[in-house]
Amino acid sequence: MQFGLFMMPLHPPYRSFADCYDRDTDQLVLADRLGFREAWLGEHLTERWENAPAPDLLIAKALALTEHLRLGTGVTLLALHHPVYLAHRLAMLDHMARGRFQWGIGGGGIPTDLAIFGMDASQPSDVRARSAEVLDVVLKLWASEGKFSYHGRFFDIDAPEMDDVKERGYYMKPYQLPHPPIAVAASTPASASIRMAGERGWIPMTSSLLSRPYLKGHWELIAEGAASAGREADRSQWRIARDVFVAPTPSLARDRARAVLGRNYVQHQLPNRAGSIQINSTKIDPAMPDEAVDVDYLMENVWIVGDPQECADKIRQLYEACGGFGTLLSITADSDDASWDHDSLRLLIEEVGPRVADLS
């Protein structure tokens, strides 16, 4: 089993932006040294707790400070971008990464992200259509030779053919051909996105929000999508994200998780998820009332919290519940004492990893 990071990122609003980005960078550098396989960095423009409007900038900085860690967007919110600019920025980033870049994609965004671009979250079909068109343009632009034209519902694009005398025209292609590995994140049980990942042979990533009973359903969608395209789904490509907090003892792990993961949940996530499908997705039993989804419930049933042996047991339980997966993505945390976060990452690799090394 491989280990990676999913950096939403989550930062309390009292943390300065500069300190947030320094903390994120420190964790990425540590992850590289410890041997984490990859890290995915989130994107939001209007989410104060997830203050990452330009993850490619943080990725570019981290690339210069790491050697092996693969870095990716987690995810690019397609509807918020102009495809020509996006294609160029990502291709340039891929060259800077020399093959260590992965492109995570997602549709839409939170309502306030959409609103700042003049889009209406109450019209999800329009947002999905725009996202699909952005993706289509980027991939076709990267694959094109010579003059490129695209005339769709949202974009009219005419990219000029390269003039060999003036050396002007469309020329930028990614470093990894035909394009960087593409990953699709999914946070709902009946996700069309996760099925598309299987169909197109892309990396499927299951959100940390889904409790164990829903994981088999995600794999079934991945396999169904792959079968529709005449291929066999590969479990080693499947990423599952989880909030993880490891400490030397079970009691210390719970104390720290309550202070950090509990703070994130009570102050940020719960107010935004109340009454939503996201709350229902975290329930082991669908009949549970929403108010039962509290910090104690999450700590024992959804999050991976404990000493190294307890966390290894919970990872094994997760693995067996869904039939196997390739990479566990640990959601990064931002404790007031940064050493807690660093200890958790170190223990996950050095103490938990060996205990689940047989899972492959």
Image: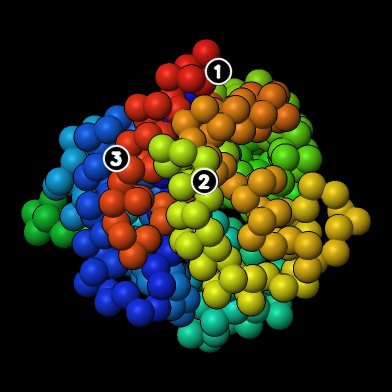
Looking at the image, is 349 positioned above or below residue 279? Answer: above
Q: Which residue is mark 2?
A: 251
Dot 1 lies on which element?
loop
Dot 3 lies on which element?
helix
Q: Which residue is mark 3?
A: 31
Distance of label 2 from label 3 (alpha carbons): 25 Å
Dot 2 lies on which element?
helix
Q: Which residue is mark 1?
A: 359
Callout 3: 10 Å neighbours few (<14), some, many (20+)? many
Residue in the foreground of this view, choosing between 217 and 36? 36
Question: Mark 2 or 3, which is nearer the eye?
Answer: 2
Callout 2: 10 Å neighbours few (<14), some, many (20+)? few
Q: Residue at x 35, y 51 (%)?
A: 340
Distance of label 1 from label 3 (alpha carbons): 21 Å
Q: Are marks 1 and 3 in contact (CB under 8 Å)?
A: no
Q: Residue at x 29, y 40 (%)?
A: 31
Residue in the foreground of this view, choosing between 215 and 249? 249
Residue in the foreground of this view, choosing between 7 and 157? 7
Q: Is residue 339 visible?
A: yes
